[in-house]
Image: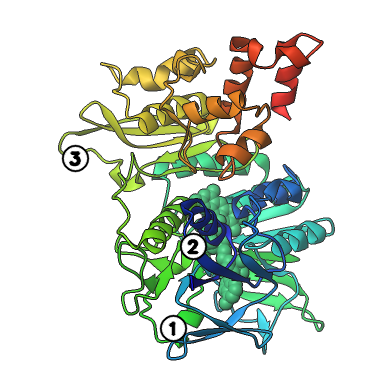
């Protein structure tokens, strides 16, 4: 009999793991238990949905293989390791040979006086993690006068911009002295805060919410900040970090720290029948709470389970690329912000123009970009990202990196689809190269969704969408023979329209 694998959690990483396992061709009986009632979806794009920049249909992820038994709206509630059973909330037992924990994380709920009555949270206090959270926020936004966003990290800034775009007055309350403290340096955070304030968003740093004021019906009506001021508010969004969902693992006696402790194959350190992947996992390199490491966990675990071998070591690549997803606000962070101070052979260039909402810092070591923060200068950000991701050597005078794109803010040669090497990664979230996009085009994919379905490009943060569309448009011109026979009007015009859909 083939081995039975039970996956607990049907989120972005659990569903990616299922895909990887299916692609491996391993003969396994797979059961998925997902407590959300929805098919797996792209959580990253929820902030776009809140901002009204996309509908829920855009969140769909590839359907699971028909061989897997997927139980939606079914939480796993207990694991009996002695009898090798996972029990779900309906009382059904699922026997296993292996369990993959992909339970993700939940919004961290700070303990704020006045926010809870017994187990009931005040009405108006919300979190942002699920489709249902996003739906609730969108519905409430139409009658919300003033929203306070507690936590000025990436998610907090995105949600604040989204609510502001929906017409709410918004205050960001951030405990750290600067916004997006994990990603930005001081100058970048100052430029970002300046842009937010310029839009009319109130930004308070080194601040906290000391209490929530509610009425007799437990509706919130105000928050009191740490300095004693009262902000009338009918919505409080909690974006002050995440808590990995490890309860079921801890209750089963698995080793847990911040997340479920695993080895470098994502195998639980205490029980080789268990794996943990994504936001609930804590492998030797640490817990990150970002999608790219989660997908790497999925790959490792699928490889270890499907052929029992250790996954091949994969280069860490150039380091993380994080983009702020907020309309009209451009910020990209490459590598670690802590590397933005000169040290040893590292040289740091800066362009700081807070009045224009612009700040760029680039750390260069041995003619290559080691880290960068780029706020409010999309042309510079695009050039830096290209050089960082492709490991390109910087110009002899690296100041050109900052000044050239500002001087000629058009598509650079390096960005032109014709000049991008075939091996270049276009979709960093999914490691999709230009060559794979070309192959998808040649096999009939003419639109971004069609390319996504074949390659996964664009199904992460969505930041590569413009580049992929650019490559498709170039291909329409460069390879008209690939499609011309079926098209009566000029191929280039019609197909370019299609590529943008
Ligand atoms: C709005 C938003 C924007 C984001 N933007 C970015 C970004 O730009 N870049 C980035 O890298 N990351 C971003 N993230 C973080 C990213 O979404 C997570 O890293 C990613 O979703 C982790 O995937 P996961 O599968 O581990 O967890 P999840 O996606 O949280 O999925 C876990 C699933 O398991 C379910 N589950 C939990 N317990 C059980 C149980 N006992 N039984 C059954 N099911 C269970 C959960 O309900 C959930 O459906 C963002 C997150 C949010 C909310």
Would residue 397 appear left or right of 256 to someone viewing this image?
left
- Looking at the image, is mark 1 or mark 3 nearer the viewer? 1
Above or below, comparing residue 429 to residue 235 in the picture: above
**Which image quadrant shows ligand 1?**
bottom right
Above or below, comparing residue 291 to residue 257 in the picture: above
Residue 343: numbered disc: 3
Residue drawn at (45%, 39%) of the image: 431
Can you name the residue that lies furthest to the front here?
1
Q: Position of residue 110 (x, y in %)?
A: 54, 74
From this viewpoint, is residue 152 visible? no
Q: Is mark 2 within 8 Å of ligand 1?
A: no
Choose the circle earlier in sequence order: 1 or 3.
Answer: 1
Would residue 219 appear left or right of 174 to someone viewing this image?
right
Choose the circle earlier in sequence order: 2 or 3.
Answer: 2
Q: Secondary structure at mark 2?
A: loop
**Depth check, front residue: 90 or 401:** 90
Q: Position of residue 323 (x, y in %)?
A: 51, 41
Q: Secondary structure at mark 3?
A: loop
Q: Is mark 1 within 8 Å of ligand 1?
A: no
Q: Secondary structure at mark 1?
A: helix
Crowd around label 1: few <14 · some 14–19 · many ≥20 (10 Å): some
Residue at mark 1: 250
Q: Position of residue 201 (x, y in %)?
A: 65, 48
Separation of marks 2 and 3 at Cα, in angstroms: 52 Å
Separation of marks 1 and 2 at Cα, in angstroms: 30 Å
Residue 27: numbered disc: 2
Separation of marks 1 and 3 at Cα, in angstroms: 42 Å
From this viewpoint, is residue 305 visible? yes
């Amino acid at each position: 009999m083939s081995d039975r694998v039970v996956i607990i959690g049907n989120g972005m990483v659990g569903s990616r793991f299922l895909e990887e396992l299916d692609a491996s061709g391993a003969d396994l009986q797979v059961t998925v238990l997902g407590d959300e009632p929805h098919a797996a979806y792209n959580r990253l794009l929820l902030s776009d949905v809140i901002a009204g920049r996309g509908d829920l249909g855009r969140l769909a992820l590839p359907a699971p293989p028909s061989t897997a038994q997927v139980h939606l709206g079914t939480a796993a509630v207990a694991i009996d390791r002695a009898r090798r059973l996972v029990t779900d909330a309906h009382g059904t037992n699922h026997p296993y040979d292996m369990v993959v924990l992909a339970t993700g994380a939940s919004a961290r709920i700070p303990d704020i006086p006045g926010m809870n009555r017994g187990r009931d949270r005040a009405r108006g206090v919300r979190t942002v993690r699920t489709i249902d959270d996003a739906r609730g926020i969108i519905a409430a936004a139409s009658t919300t006068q003033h929203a306070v966003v507690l936590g000025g990290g990436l998610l907090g800034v995105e949600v604040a911009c989204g609510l502001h775009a929906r017409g709410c007055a918004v205050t960001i309350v951030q405990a750290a002295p600067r916004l997006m403290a994990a990603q930005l340096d001081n100058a970048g955070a100052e430029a970002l805060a300046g842009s937010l304030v310029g839009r009319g968003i109130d930004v308070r740093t080194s601040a906290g919410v000391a209490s929530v004021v509610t009425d007799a019906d437990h509706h919130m009506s105000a928050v009191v900040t740490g300095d004693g001021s009262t902000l009338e508010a009918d919505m409080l969004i909690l974006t002050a970090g995440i808590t990995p969902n490890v309860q079921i693992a801890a209750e089963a006696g698995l080793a847990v720290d911040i997340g479920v402790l695993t080895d470098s194959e994502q195998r639980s350190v205490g029980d080789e029948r268990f794996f943990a992947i994504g936001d609930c996992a804590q492998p030797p390199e640490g817990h990150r709470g970002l999608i790219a490491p989660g997908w790497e966990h999925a790959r490792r675990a699928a490889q270890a389970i499907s052929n029992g071998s250790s996954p091949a070591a994969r280069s860490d690549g150039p380091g993380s690329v994080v983009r702020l997803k907020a309309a009209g606000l451009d910020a990209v962070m490459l590598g670690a912000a802590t590397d933005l101070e000169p040290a040893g052979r590292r040289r740091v260039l800066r362009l700081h123009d807070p009045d224009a909402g612009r700040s760029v810092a680039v750390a260069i070591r041995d003619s290559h970009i080691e880290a960068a923060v780029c706020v409010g200068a999309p042309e510079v950000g695009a050039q830096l990202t290209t050089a960082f991701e492709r490991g390109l050597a910087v110009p002899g005078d690296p100041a050109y990196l900052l000044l050239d794109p500002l001087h000629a803010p058009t598509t650079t040669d390096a960005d032109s689809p014709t000049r991008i090497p075939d091996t270049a990664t276009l979709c960093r979230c999914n490691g999709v190269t230009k060559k794979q996009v070309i192959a998808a085009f040649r096999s009939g994919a003419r639109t971004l969704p069609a390319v996504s379905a074949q390659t996964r490009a664009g199904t992460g943060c969505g930041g590569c969408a413009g580049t992929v569309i650019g490559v498709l448009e170039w291909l329409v011109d460069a390879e008209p023979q690939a499609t011309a026979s079926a098209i009566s009007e000029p191929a280039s015009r019609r197909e370019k329209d299609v590529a943008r859909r």
